Image (tube, rainbow, N blue to C red):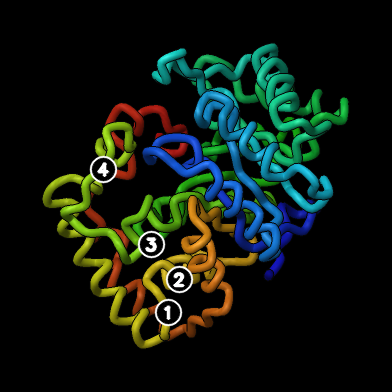
Amino acid sequence: MKLRQLGTNGPTVSALGLGCMGMSDLYGNADRKESIATIHEALEGGVTTFDTGDFYGVGHNELLLREALQGTKRDNAFIAVKFGVMRAPGGGWIGVDGRPQAVKNFLAYTLQRLGVDYIDLYQPARVDPNVPIEETVGAIADMVKAGYVRHIGLSEAGVETIRRAHAVHPISALQIEYSLFSRGVEAEILPALRELGISLSAYGVLSRGLLSGTWTKDRTLGAYDFRNHAPRFAGENLDRNLTLVDALREIAHEKDATVAQIAIAWVLSRGADIMPLIGARKRTHLQDALGALKLELTAADLQRIESIVPAEAVAGERYATDQMKMLDSER
């Protein structure tokens, strides 16, 4: 496993992290035993970062991760937790809450569900437009002083918010979508992160399966699959996006790799301060992703990849309109 440093003065973590959300939520049913086996195999493969959220499956994901990590030395798992998104008993989405008292309340429940004494990286999943980011980050900073949190992160935050948060307490990482299909971060956010010494934790590196190389336009999704409402999976958008994937397939064949490995290796190539999160729910998907670490892309390869998949060629926004409005990073 290759290693990368989190932030300017942060710990060393695995170059690839495991995003656990799909094991509990948003992509349809998952096999619990296979999910736990995948986490175990990730540990054996040298993965140290495990990304979860207290709202993934309304606490289910944290409990699942606790079960999977039992017997593992605490220092061997770098646990990143997102908080602040609220859910109703039926699973509906009912807003975000970044108030200081809510931050500390969310953290108390997370520590209990995970069965740990501290969280390695704690980050609001969305910026609460009704609460100054200084207050939200200040509350997490209190928890750092108390020993319950080691490092502070942000998620889907824009440049102004990042700077304001960083002025309150050093921010170690920003989690944001970044892939061949989602490159908006490159214009302003990534340069600002590098100026401030903040790492980028990249989710959606396979564009929720589009860049897996196995997606087909006739694939049937379950009723509760988030992708039913994702613009890139709809109608002509899907057709256009799969045409881009087919073009990548030729390069993958030449490199004796999978399309997914090409997509992951491209993100890895963007800088040592970028750590992709792999949303694998099965061991086979995990092993495919880990194979990207062995893939060497030359400057010519990278130029060809970017010419085949120019950012402006991707069809559809990364979220539906109402969800895009919730992203501070898109304002």
Q: Cα distance, mark 3 to mark 1? A: 17 Å
Q: Viewer-proximal residue, 258 or 121?
A: 258
The residue labelled by disc 1 is: 257
Q: Amino acid at mark 3?
A: Leu
Tell me which label, 3 or 2, sits earlier in the chain. Answer: 3
Observer-side mark, 3 or 1, equals: 1
Q: Is residue 275 above or below residue 58?
A: below
The residue labelled by disc 4 is: 221
The residue labelled by disc 3 is: 180
Instruction: Evaluate if marks 3 and 2 touch, with contact meaning CB atoms under 8 Å apart.
Output: no
Instruction: Evaluate if marks 3 and 4 touch, with contact meaning CB atoms under 8 Å apart.
Output: no
Q: Is residue 258 above or below residue 310?
A: below
| Label of residue 261 in the image | 2
For the point 61% across and 44% down, the residue is 51
Q: Secondary structure at mark 3?
A: loop
Q: Amino acid at mark 1?
A: Ala
Observer-side mark, 3 or 4, equals: 4
For the point 61% across and 37% down, the residue is 64
Residue 35 location (% of width, % of height): 54, 47
Residue 306 location (% of width, % of height): 35, 72
Observer-side mark, 3 or 2, equals: 2
Tell me which label, 3 or 4, sits earlier in the chain. Answer: 3
Total labels drawn: 4
Residue 11 location (% of width, % of height): 79, 54
Instruction: Evaluate if marks 2 and 1 touch, with contact meaning CB atoms under 8 Å apart.
Output: yes
Residue 52 quadrant: top right
Q: Viewer-proximal residue, 247 or 54?
A: 54
Instruction: Evaluate if marks 4 and 1 touch, with contact meaning CB atoms under 8 Å apart.
Output: no
For the point 68% across and 70% down, the residue is 2
